[in-house]
Image (cartoon, grey):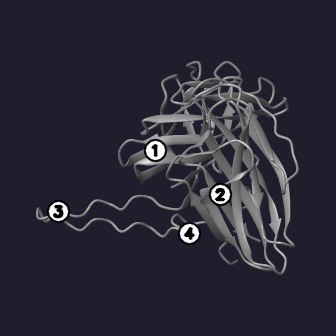
Amino acid sequence: MSDPIVAGLPGLAPAGIGAFPGHVGPLGGSSGGAPPPPPASGVNYIVKPADQTKNSSNVLSIDNDLHLSNVPIGTHAFECWLDFVEANSTMGAQIGFAGMSAVEGGGFQFPSGGAPSAFANQNLTGPVVITLSAVQLRGGLLVDGYFTMAAQATFSLLWSQAVSNAGNLTLKAGSWLKVMV
Amino acid sequence: MSAPVISYVIATMNQSFINAAPQNDNELVLALAANTRYAFEIGIRYTNANSGITFQITFTVPALTAFVQVAQKCYPQQAGTGTGTGTPVGAPVANCTLSNNNNIDRIEMIGAISVGANAGNLQMQCRRTGGATDPTRLPGSYLMLQRL
């Protein structure tokens, strides 16, 4: 989704803002242990603070930054912008998500120097293969949809090279994930 | 720089919509202040037991309010593409034909609202045309406003 709200907000909107204040966590039980952390609440933005590289594997793995902890049970909307750079044109990229019981969505890929293309509503558990530009070696990916949590847990972005290659695939700083809880 | 003022509501229950006139969504409604401008973002997720249903959404706003719909996407699950047409206020703004039985489709919209002298609500409404059963708006659907 082309989103002027989000474009102007990463880094400005802290988690938990909005109509619903954060939930109050349960009181400690008789065991005396620390209470579990409260669930995430609000319009949550996570912006990737630094580049991250992966190489020599086409197995999806969790991103270092783009994940949200303590997402409560229920169905939640999400959106993400991913800015990939590949060291050569043979690897490509692929994405997926983890932590949820189901995820559906779609979006657009924007190869630098090429024409945008849409991908349909689909199961996004992955891998969803993304074709980056073979000329510019850089491509953006805008994905949105909904996911369902069967238990309070962490919702995470997964990504890797589509074809294992010794060169680096980089997810650039500034890529972001928005989750409405 | 002051923090942005954002309000939003997320649906938590299913709601079915009958044919004919647009019907208020029980959950997707937000307050609008007088003499205020907002950017909005809307995400609707819905399904139906039969194919051939056109699911339409529209909005009611206070008098003297301008509603500018900038962009809209519709994602029928099976076809993978979709289009939306219509007039922003006073008529259905999104037409999305369900592609198959029990699929989950999505509508997304962004735009701006300029509220005049009358405060009130941004109230989403839905209806269906065609088909034999009522479409259902699903949990996770949301309205979000950012005060400008």
Given the image, on which type of amino acid does mark 4 rest? Answer: Ala
Q: Are marks 1 and 3 on the same chain?
A: yes
Residue shown at the point (86%, 58%) measured from the top left = B68
Most foreground residue, A141 or B88 = B88
Q: Which residue is mark 4?
A: A19
> In the figure, is residue A93 to the left or right of B118?
left
Residue A171's x, y, as percent?
61, 40
* Residue A6: image tag: none
Q: Earlier in the sequence, mark 3 or mark 4?
A: 4
Mark 3 belongs to which subunit? A
Question: Residues at badges 3 and 2 in contact (C-beta under 8 Å)?
Answer: no
Mark 3 vs mark 2, CA separation in Å = 38 Å
The relative height of residue A51 versus residue A86 in the rendered view (above or below) is: below
Mark 2 belongs to which subunit? B
Residue shown at the point (55%, 68%) measured from the top left = A17
Asked whether the viewer can see residue A77, the reply is yes
Mark 1 vs mark 2, CA separation in Å = 22 Å
> In the figure, is residue B108 to the left or right of B88?
left
Mark 1 vs mark 4, CA separation in Å = 22 Å
Question: Residues at badges 1 and 4 in contact (C-beta under 8 Å)?
Answer: no
Q: Which residue is mark 3?
A: A33
